[in-house]
Amino acid sequence: MAIEQTLIVVKPDGLIKSLTGNVISRLAEAKLTIMGAKVMRVSRELAEKHYEHLKDKPFFEELIMYIMGEVHKTRRVLALVYQGDNAITKIRDVVGDTNPEMANPVSIRGAYGRITTTGVFENVVHASSSPEDAEKEIKLWFQPDEIIEDLYPVKEVTLKNVKKLVWA
Ligand code: UDP
Ligand code: MG
């Protein structure tokens, strides 16, 4: 038994193709617990930190434009945190291979992904690939109060002169 957390992001191609419902149904096959969920915009800063490990690849800039929604003209993604026994492997199995043409056709990427003419894998979802990546990614994409339980240690800070929007 290894209780793991994992970050899943339904990428802009998934949103523009109205696949969020299908993706969540497919993820349910892994029988995990959903801990957090939000629709959000991906800033360039978040995109570059998330894909830091690929910064030397020739497709890096295109990948950043893809995850930011610039390619699909929809600046929205759905970010999800799941937790459970062997969560990372279970989710990666349902999600399928990085290359949608190589992915099992019954996996999410196999069923819904494509390769663009410039060679970028538009593969509908991101899923963490190790516990270390999951921790880094969840801390990057979510604040503690956006997740139903404290998955990692937290500390209390008092913020002064912080501006925020409230309902008028
Ligand atoms: N990617 C790509 N071409 C490649 C490798 C990766 O377009 O040869 C894109 C693809 O969208 C992938 C993302 O970069 O999901 C992150 O790559 P990674 O190797 O981390 O694959 P993943 O963990 O998403 O399966
Ligand atoms: Mg990866």
Image (cartoon, grey):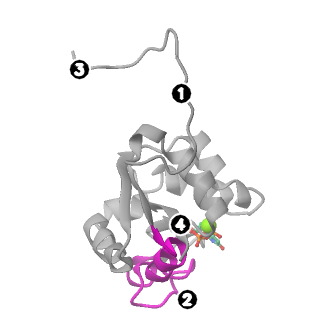
Q: Confirm whether residue 10 shows in the render.
A: no
Q: Write the start and end of the magenta stretch as one range.
A: 84-113
**54 or 1: which is nearer to us?**
1
Read off the residue under disc 3.
167
- Residue type beneath disc 2: Met
Q: Secondary structure at mark 2?
A: loop
Tell whether 21 sits left or right of 52. Answer: left
Q: Confirm whether residue 131 shows in the render.
A: yes
How much space separates mark 4 and mark 3, taking CA atoms? 36 Å
Per the image, is 154 magenta?
no
Tell whether 15 sits left or right of 95. Answer: left
Mark in front: 4 vs 3: 4
How much space separates mark 1 and mark 3, taking CA atoms? 25 Å
Of the numbered discs 1 and 3, the one sitting upstream in the chain is 1
Q: How far across and how far down the image is residue 22, in percent?
A: 28, 73
Q: Are marks 1 and 3 in contact (CB under 8 Å)?
A: no
Of the numbered discs 2 and 3, the one sitting upstream in the chain is 2
Quadrant for the C terminus, please: top left
Q: How far across and how far down the image is residue 42, in percent?
A: 49, 45
User: Looking at the picture, does residue 11 appear above or below residue 106?
Assistant: above
Read off the residue under disc 1.
156
Q: Is mark 2 within 8 Å of ligand 1?
A: no
**30 or 107: which is nearer to us?**
30
Q: Residue at x 44, y 76 (%)?
A: 113
Q: Secondary structure at mark 1?
A: loop
Read off the residue under disc 4.
4
Q: Residue at x 55, y 38 (%)?
A: 154
